[in-house]
Amino acid sequence: MAISLREARRGDELAVAEVHVRAWQEAYRGLIPAEFLDALDPRERAARYTFESPDPAAPTTVLAVEAGEDGAEAIQGFVTFGPSRDEDAQGFGEVYALYVDPDRYQGGVGRLLMAESRRRLHEAGFTAAILWVLQGNTRAANFYEREGWSPDRATRVEQPYGIRSTVDRFRRELP
């Protein structure tokens, strides 16, 4: 089946959250406490998304979808991007999130989504972009490096959902 890209819209929240949770559970196993990962609830995550926001400064989320024989779409991954939120990277674009359903790893979905985010950020006038990677997530770091991103030596400690984690910043010139 062919993968196509489209922007997320209202009604996609739960399907996106299901991919998001499966990806976290796969990618962060051993890096984040298993009890936390096992307790993730896609319904709770879905409530955090706002697709089709009228705010022009709102992030953009693009979905990789695959149509089944019955015409129903299955979300295979997503990327969310917009202006950098970092004080020392004002004027840059930022990839806030890139997650692919673990069943689709190695299938080109991540590369397709990453290329689309770079293209759109460049079209929005950004000449460089950043993203953050959880330390120890070597699969993601290797993927980003193959995609032309490089660590820029910035590191920070975050506490999403009360889980302390250290992340490294990567940078890439656009397009």
Image (cartoon, grey):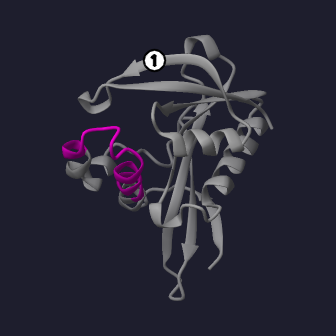
Quadrant in which the N terminus is drawn:
bottom right
Q: Main secondary structure of the magenta part?
A: helix
Q: From the image, tell me which residue sits under label 1.
A: 156
From the viewer's perspective, is residue 164 above or below residue 112?
above
> Is residue 67 left or right of 42 when viewed as pictured?
right
Q: Residue at x 24, y 28 (%)?
A: 162
Q: Quadrant of residue 130?
A: top right
Does 131 sit left or right of 44 as displayed? right
* Residue 128 percent location from the top left of the image: 74, 27
Please give the name of the residue rendered at 54% of the width and 61% of the height, measured from the top-left corner.
105
Q: In the figure, 36 relative to 23: above or below?
A: above
Badge 1 element: strand
Segment tinted magenta in the rendering? 19-36
Q: In which quarter of the image is residue 131?
A: top right
Horizontal side, residue 75 vs residue 84: left or right = left
Q: Percent from the top left, x then y, of residue 136?
A: 45, 35
The residue lying toward the viewer, choosing from 27 and 97, is 27
Residue drawn at (71%, 43%), measured in percent from left and top? Answer: 147
